[in-house]
Structure formats: C-alpha cells, structure tokens
Image (cartoon, grey):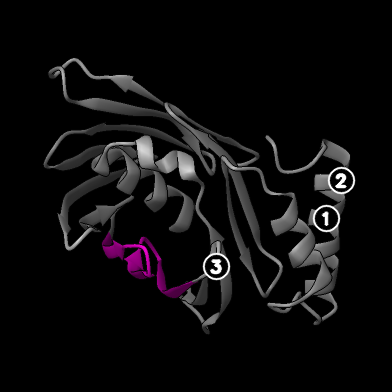
C-alpha cells in the first residue's frame, strides 16, 4: 500500500471511527479527509464517506491489494483475450472470467454476471453483482447508478468523484478517488474490480 505507513493508516482509520461514533463524521472539507487524499499515491483507490467509512486499495496492472481486498488478474483458459479475476474481496472468494462482452463468475456463494459496453467514452455495466441487480456508468465527469447494494450519484471535482451514496439506507456524502492504473485494465475486468470495491 502506498497510502500511509501501517501505524498512521490505522490511526486515521481509528480517528474516522471515533469521529463517526461521536456524531461528528468528517465533512467534505475536514482535515482528516484532506490528509487521506493528500497521502494517496498515484495507484491508490480510496472510498471515503461522511460517516467515516474508509476503503482503500493499491491498484496496478494485474492486481488489487488492500486491507479488505486481494485480487489478481490472470490469463484465462478460454482464449487469448479473456482474463480471470481471482482472490478475496471483503471476506468473499472471487472467481470471475472477463471477456470482450462482459464478466461472469462467483463472488462468495453469489453469481456475478455483467454485460459491459462503451458509448461516448463511458463505461457501462449491467447485470448481477454478487447476486444484486446492478447498472452503473463511469466516464470522465460522472460515476452513477446501482452497484451491488449501493446507489451512487457522483460528479467529478478535480481528482475525485463527489456526491451521494445510499446503501440500503439514508443517502450520505461520499468521495471516490480512482487511480490512473485502472486505465490499463480491460473494460470487463475494470467493471468487476470497481463493482467489488464500490458495491461492498
């Protein structure tokens, strides 16, 4: 991980948890939030909510590694252009095959089946993500739609996507930082990785 040294990372996570428990979760302009985003390296994925939830991972060609996720991307048996995404995400085993048309496989004991397409430079994924109906869209300006159990309405502001997220409850503010390394992933593998990170 490039985000922070281990002790600092856990201290920030503890600070976020404590402020959330006390009812003063970090606002969009809070010092804790800015410290986390400033510390992020070029390959860092970050999801940070106003309630104090933090998901981080290092994303590079062929791998996603973080406190809650450890995924690898491998050549698949099906053909030269297919890829397999395997590993663990949020305590669930992942085994998904990605092709030009989409991605299919298992997350935990639930199916993942996504149809992936591009239109006007936007990536769109539709189908099931860990058994939950999903339909989401990502481009240079917005990240919107339903990803697993969560719905997003985010607009890009500088380096980050900012806006509202709702996960089977009241909507709350969320910040998402996507690393440059994602540009090297195939569309279906990208849709799978984002779905697992954002839909947990």
Work out how far the residue at label 1 is from the one at label 2, CA to CA, in angstroms: 6 Å
Quick one: SS at disc 2? helix
From mark 2 to mark 3, how far is it between C-alphas? 25 Å
Q: Position of residue 177 (x, y in %)?
A: 55, 57
- Frontmost of labels 2 and 3 is 3
Q: Is residue 12 visible to the viewer in this orientation of the structure?
A: yes
Q: Is residue 200 something that shows in the picture?
A: no
Element type at mark 3: loop
Percent across and percent down for residue 152 are 41, 72
Q: Which residues are magenta?
A: 133-156
Question: Residue sitting at 21 percent across and 39 percent down?
Answer: 104
Q: Which residue is mark 3?
A: 158
Q: Nearer the viewer, mark 3 or mark 1?
A: 3
At horizontal 54% and vertical 44% (from top left) the residue drawn is 90
Numbered badge on residue 31: none
Q: Residues within 10 Å of mark 2 (few under 14, many from 20)?
A: few
Q: Is residue 122 left or right of residue 54?
A: left
- Left or right of residue 12, residue 137 in this image: left
Q: Residue at x 46, y 39 (%)?
A: 181
Q: Is residue 22 left or right of residue 60?
A: right
Q: Which mark is residue 12?
A: 1
Check whether the beta carbons of the residues at disc 1 and disc 2 lie within 8 A of each other: yes
Residue 36 rendering spot, x and y as whole percentages: 74, 57
The residue that disc 2 covers is 8
Label 2 with label 3: CB-CB less than 8 Å: no
**Residue 77 position by quadrant:** top left
Q: Front-most of 147 and 100?
A: 100
């Amino acid at each position: 991980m490039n985000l922070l040294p281990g002790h600092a990372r856990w201290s920030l996570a503890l600070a976020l948890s404590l402020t959330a428990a006390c009812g003063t979760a970090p606002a969009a302009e809070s010092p804790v939030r800015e410290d986390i985003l400033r510390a992020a390296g070029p390959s860092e994925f970050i999801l940070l909510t106003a309630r104090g939830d933090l998901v981080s991972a290092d994303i590079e060609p062929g791998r996603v590694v973080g406190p809650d996720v450890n995924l690898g991307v491998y050549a698949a048996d099906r053909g030269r252009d297919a890829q397999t995404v395997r590993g663990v995400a949020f305590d669930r085993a992942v085994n998904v095959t990605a092709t030009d048309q989409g991605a299919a496989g298992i997350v935990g004991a639930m199916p993942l089946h996504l149809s992936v397409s591009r239109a006007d430079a936007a990536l769109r994924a539709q189908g099931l993500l860990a058994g939950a109906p999903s339909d989401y869209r990502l481009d240079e300006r917005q990240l919107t739609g339903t990803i697993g159990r969560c719905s997003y309405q985010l607009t890009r502001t500088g380096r980050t996507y900012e806006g509202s997220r709702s996960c089977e409850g009241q909507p709350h503010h969320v910040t998402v930082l996507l690393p440059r390394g994602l540009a090297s992933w195939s569309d279906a593998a990208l849709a799978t990785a984002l779905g697992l990170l954002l839909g947990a």
